[in-house]
């Protein structure tokens, strides 16, 4: 599998001179399994991925939403392939909110907030509900399949985490989640033995506790510290930890510092940055 990061920031896009290296676009990760394109979240990074995919149309892509907070859906109205007839986009999301995924995606494009409606997009779209613990299997064009298993995390209004297994390798995408006193047993189960764990590491422990001089405690906001990500990585026995969903307040230097501190605890850790791409 090939994993590529198109948006690594949490909460809100953060362009500017202090975030050039890590990048300012919000959550979007591409996982290519054989000939199958899987996309995790449609934050503003999705716009850039769309520009690349537009060079290989007609295309079929599968977008899995962790949840529908702005930073995970705002790139969708700017996803070029969605406007082109002949393309097929399968969208997957939770039945864990008061509105369906389709209603939410349409809602963010409603007048007067946006000029083009979801129904004006030319691609064929399918909307698919997810159910906890149920796996989905898709062909990858090489005689093999890719298996996507869902799990849950702790986040306001709920969140899905995903495990992707293909050709004996595995990647877990677990963003926007908080562990509280113990490592979340649901994520521990999902991440067990994975080759790569992409995990929410929005805060340093000091930021989370409210002692970093930037606002109060962040308990209950639904995000993790890098130390919690490390704890899960250690307990689950994963090969590699990718720190993800960086706080908008963190400059390039702050993210690099967070990365160095994580590495001291779990050597095979690194901070996600826009353009990071590797083979699993
Ligand atoms: Zn988020
Ligand atoms: Zn969120």
Image: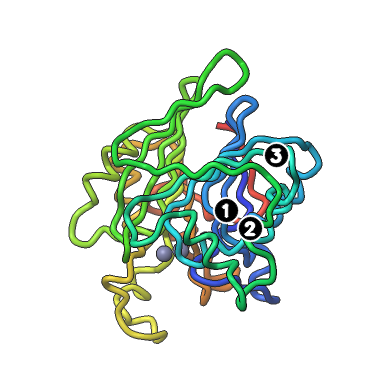
Nearer mark to the viewer, of 1 and 3: 3
Quarter, ligand 2: bottom left
Find residue 109 and report its image quarter: bottom right
Please name the residue shown 42% across and 41% down the image.
Answer: 172
In the current view of this chain or complex, which residue is farthest to the top?
A: 143
Q: Position of residue 224 (x, y in %)?
A: 35, 62
Query: Where does label 1 land, which residue?
Result: 28
Q: Earlier in the sequence, mark 3 or mark 2?
A: 2
Distance from the alpha carbon under mark 3 to that under mark 2: 20 Å
Q: Quadrant of the C terminus?
A: top right
Query: Are the residues flagged by discs 1 and 3 in contact, CB closer than 8 Å?
Result: no
Q: Position of residue 191 (x, y in %)?
A: 34, 39
Q: Is residue 181 left or right of residue 131?
A: left
Residue 173, located in which quarter of the rendered image? top left
In the rendering, at what x and y percent does residue 33 appear? 58, 29
Residue 19 pos. (x, y %): 64, 70
Q: Secondary structure at mark 2?
A: helix
Residue picked out by circle 3:
87
Of the numbered discs 1 and 3, the one sitting upstream in the chain is 1
Is 83 displayed left or right of 92 in the figure?
right
Q: Which residue is mark 2?
A: 45
Question: What whole-number distance in Å separates the C-alpha atoms at marks 2 and 1?
Answer: 5 Å
- What colour scheme does the image use? rainbow
The quadrant in which the N terminus is found is top right
Which SS class for mark 1? strand
- Is residue 256 at least partly visible in the picture? no
The relative height of residue 139 versus residue 209 in the rendered view (above or below) is above
> Is the C-beta separation of discs 2 and 1 under 8 Å?
yes
């Amino acid at each position: 599998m090939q994993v590529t990061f198109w948006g690594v920031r949490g909460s809100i896009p953060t362009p500017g001179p202090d975030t050039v290296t890590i990048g300012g676009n919000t959550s979007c990760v591409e996982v290519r399994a054989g000939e199958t394109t899987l996309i995790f979240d449609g934050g503003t990074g999705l716009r850039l991925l769309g520009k690349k995919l537009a060079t290989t149309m007609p295309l079929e892509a599968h977008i899995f939403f962790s949840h529908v907070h702005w930073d995970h859906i705002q790139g969708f109205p700017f996803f070029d392939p969605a406007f082109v007839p002949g393309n097929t986009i399968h969208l997957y999301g939770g039945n864990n909110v008061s509105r369906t995924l389709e209603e939410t995606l349409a809602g963010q494009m409603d007048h007067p907030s946006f000029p083009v409606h979801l129904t004006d997009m030319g691609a064929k779209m399918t909307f698919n509900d997810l159910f906890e613990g149920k796996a989905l299997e898709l062909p990858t064009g090489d005689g093999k399949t890719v298996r996507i298993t869902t799990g849950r995390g702790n986040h306001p209004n709920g969140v899905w985490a995903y495990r992707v297994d293909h050709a004996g390798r595995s990647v877990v995408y677990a963003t926007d989640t908080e562990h509280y006193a113990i490592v979340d047993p649901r994520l521990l189960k999902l991440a067990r033995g994975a080759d790569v764990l992409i995990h929410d590491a929005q805060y340093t422990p000091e930021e989370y506790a409210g002692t970093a001089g930037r606002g109060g405690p962040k308990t209950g906001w639904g995000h993790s510290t890098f130390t919690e990500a490390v704890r899960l990585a250690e307990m689950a026995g994963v090969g590699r930890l990718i720190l993800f969903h960086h706080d908008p307040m963190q400059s390039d230097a702050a993210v690099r510092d967070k990365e160095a501190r994580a590495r001291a605890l779990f050597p095979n850790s690194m901070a996600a940055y826009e353009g990071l791409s590797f083979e699993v």
